[in-house]
Amino acid sequence: MAHLTEGVEGLRSIPALLGRNAKIHADSPAYREKEYGIWQSWTWSEAEREIEALALGLLKLGVNEGDFIAIIGRNRPYLYWSIVAAQMVGAVPVPLYQDASAEEMAYVLGHCGARFVIVADQEQVDKVIEVQEGLHQFEHMIYLDPRGLRKYDHSHLHQFSQVQDQGRAAREDFSAELERRQAGKNYDDICVMLYTSGTTGKPKGVVLSNRNIIETAKNSAEFDHLKTDDEVLAYLPMAWVGDFIFSIGQAYWTGFCVNCPESPETMMTDLREIAPSYYFAPPRVFETQLTSIMIRMEDASPLKKRLFHHFMSRARKVGPKILDGEPVGLLDRLHYKLGEALVFGPLKNTLGFSKVRVGYTAGEAIGPEIFDFYRALGINLKQLYGQTEASVFITQQPDGQVRSDTVGVPSPGVEIRIAENGEVFYRSPGVFVEYFKNADSTADTKDAEGWVATGDAGFIEESTGHLRIIDRAKDVGAMADGAMFAPKYVENKLKFYPNILEAVVMGAGRDRCCAFINIDLTAVGNWAERNNIAYASYQELAGHSRVLDMIQAHVEEVNASVAQDEMLSGCQVHRFLVLHKELDADDGELTRTRKVRRKIIGEKFGDLVEALYDGSDSIYTETEVTYEDGRKGKIKATLEIRDAKVMPVAPKAMAAE
């Protein structure tokens, strides 16, 4: 594996790495995709031929150097090839979120001035056509799946396979130009442009260079000893920087295989079949999987329940120690091995984690209880801290130094400093070039020396050098009495419970904290069926008195836990309500990466916030919602507001003794 640790001289672009892999790993699998229930595979040499054919076809269509090519669809080898083919011809790939509305797409397509768009299917074609009149630079669209598109006007609409065929046929005419463009690639040329999720406003186009992506991929791959025979499952949005660094950056640096599931519905089955050795998921995925496990255990036989709880209670104590190579007694090791045979092994196999050697979670803080659960199973789950503007990696947890309350040490090549107000700053080879067409935001975020403001508040532990993130700097505030307010800390504790899907805690500048809560329909619906509770809708279940009793018990358990943290004990939830609808990206309440948009939620549900703080027992409300077909409607509900028991906090003087 010596070639993986060599410098990057001569490997100054993703297409250059493709050329190296096609020579060194010619017959190794580069991509797999499941279609119609069957896994198809392409080697690195085959992938190079497919990508080159598409690149030649793009030249024939008239793609110029510096053009922006938007790419929209779920994770498929063909769309990853489109990214690399765009780079080959000197264009800039711009992946978009496939579930974005036509209006959201219109903003990005117009902002970057995309002349070409490559899409997966009819759904995405229709969205682009809907907004194309306002896209003055748009010229051609290439589609992958021809179903439903036979009668469309094809004067500017082209089938992917035909563009490749035309490229192959025109090889003699365009191969010299393709070679010229590849040879002219510079390490500081644009590699990709990725748009931020837009939690506080319009998304910003983050320009990342070849240097940003390749240096970051190299450093992070070496940190975790990633190898050519590693396997990853590419299922997260292609527009998200994490997918780009894992499925393009690290994949092309190390030469490992990228596996694409057939659909979101088959993702768990496909995960089990691939059993990746390198795996990433945001906290929500791990939360959902844990919810599924707990639901299954509720339906299990009494014997299975007893076995599960017995071995899990011991595993929580010794599993992480075994993972970290710490000394563990012989009896505890034997007991853990028995648990591995009876419980942990089958459970990991069901989850698709039987071969995970390196697992990461990031994007938001994960609840410590959730994190510890997976570590207890023997899964090497770690945390990293990153941003689009950093090409992902700011900190990582080294093996043997994994904890639920930190995000690790600076990644290789990264420097970190903490400002006087507690905000975290970093600089590294991965630091973005600029925000596209937004010099003011670039200057606000990155200073002349390359230091980037993260917007997060945190501190570095003196004894370990690990970074601890408290919350978003803009979200961390003070209660009316001066006590620290950090909503995410409490929200993550609430979301540990399988019955709670989302929580929004408010309290900055106020005398107490209150919360909105979304129930998890799958978990609570399963509980309702077991308890003979009939319901006809999410709204009806969310408002049921026994559901509210259950959520109240969870809130009060969290309050007892929060009360033990002297610094954050003022963040206990005094009052709460269960929302009558799920927070939704289509309604603007979440970003496309499912981050809470606090300001929008506070404004949209202002009447509910007021009722929480004025002592009301209930509140009638009407809320506009967006249906799957794009239509708008209103839902009406009268919501019950509950008081939660708040735990006493030991005086500071007593706590210090």
Image (cartoon, grey):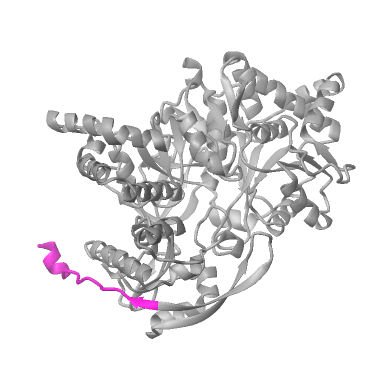
Percent of width and height locating residue 319 = 25, 37
Q: Is residue 369 left or right of residue 279?
A: left
Residue in the image at 50% along x and 72% along y: 602
Q: Is residue 134 left or right of residue 252?
A: right
Percent of width and height locating residue 289 = 41, 46
The quarter of the picture where the C terminus appears is: bottom left
Residue in the image at 80% along x and 45% along y: 115
Percent of width and height locating residue 466 = 32, 44
Residue 630 in sight here: yes
Q: Indicate whether residue 432 is drawn in magenta.
A: no
Percent of width and height locating residue 360 = 42, 39
Boundaries of the magenta span: 641-657
In the displayed structure, 416 sits above or below 585; it is above
Q: Is residue 492 left or right of residue 79?
A: left
Q: Quadrant of residue 311?
A: top left
In the displayed structure, 593 sits above or below 83; it is below
In the displayed structure, 121 sits above or below 453; it is above
Between 543 and 251, the one nearer to me in the picture? 543
